[in-house]
Image: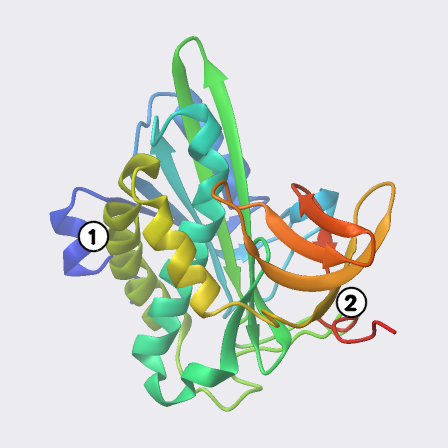
Amino acid sequence: MLTLSDTATAAGFRLVHLAEIGSTNAEALARGADGDRGPTWYVADRQVAGRGRLGRSWTGFEGNLFATLLLTDPAPTQRISQLCFVAALALDDALLTLAPDLEYRFKVKWPNDALLDGAKVSGTLIEATTRGTTTQVAIGIGVNVAHHPADTPYPTTSLAAAGIAVARDQVFAALSRSMVTALAIWRRGDGFDAIRAGWLARAHNLGGPLVVRTDERRIEGVFVGLDRDGRLLLDTPDGRETITVGDVSPALAGLMH
């Protein structure tokens, strides 16, 4: 049964459970426009028009987790992008509570993916809308629990395919609990240094070579960390690059010459 954790309920979070929806992010923001101020989780059994980063579709199979957390004015505008790191830590903590022996198989990939054995098992999409002086944020999280797509340009997997026998409802309950903790650590951005440190401790290929694609460039370098705003730091033959937006493919990591 899909339920919030006791921790989330005590913190005032609510749950809206939907059978089928186009996009949980779109639904959350629409409900926010109609007066829901959150914090509210919107979870669908099936998502048929989901979106990922860079305009990619993110539809999926029943048995996977399609969830969006709606927040109102969670932080000053310039700090809202930090929520992708907050969400990544919350999800990683949730998965490790369910499979504690697999700590070294789970990694986070800049800026918003979770990897299991080097393949994408989850993605996060942060979207925000401002009306007057009020900003509402949708934190969309999709987790391949039972199934994963096969027609992607990068490796994907699911918890089931990796031998982790957990149900969607268990993943959500654990996530609803760990998100409360992660948001409390973040403290509207005042605690981002702790979030950043936790994220780097679980980062995929930190200290190793990465390839990053932006709209204009393909950049090769060594992943040396994040700056104080969460931008990726890449040491290249031409000097240090600070990357705000880009696509890091785990399949390309390690191919530098």
Could you say where residue 104 lies in the image, as x and y percent from the top left?
46, 84
- Above or below — where is 235 with respect to 99? above
Q: 102 or 43: nearer the eye?
A: 102
Residue at the limit of the structure toward the top, as seen here: 132
- Above or below — where is 130 with respect to 152? above
Q: Is residue 153 left or right of residue 89?
A: right
Residue type at numbered disc 2: Thr
Q: In this view, does 257 lie to the left or right of 247?
A: right
Q: In this figure, which residue is indicated by the disc labeled 2?
A: 152
- The colour style of the image is rainbow
- Above or below — where is 27 with respect to 155? above
Q: Is residue 215 left or right of residue 234?
A: right
Q: Distance between the residues labelled 2 and 1?
A: 34 Å
In what quadrant of the picture does the N terminus appear? bottom left
- Image disc number at residue 8: 1
Task: Evaluate if marks 2 and 1 touch, with contact meaning CB atoms under 8 Å apart.
Answer: no
Residue type at numbered disc 1: Ala
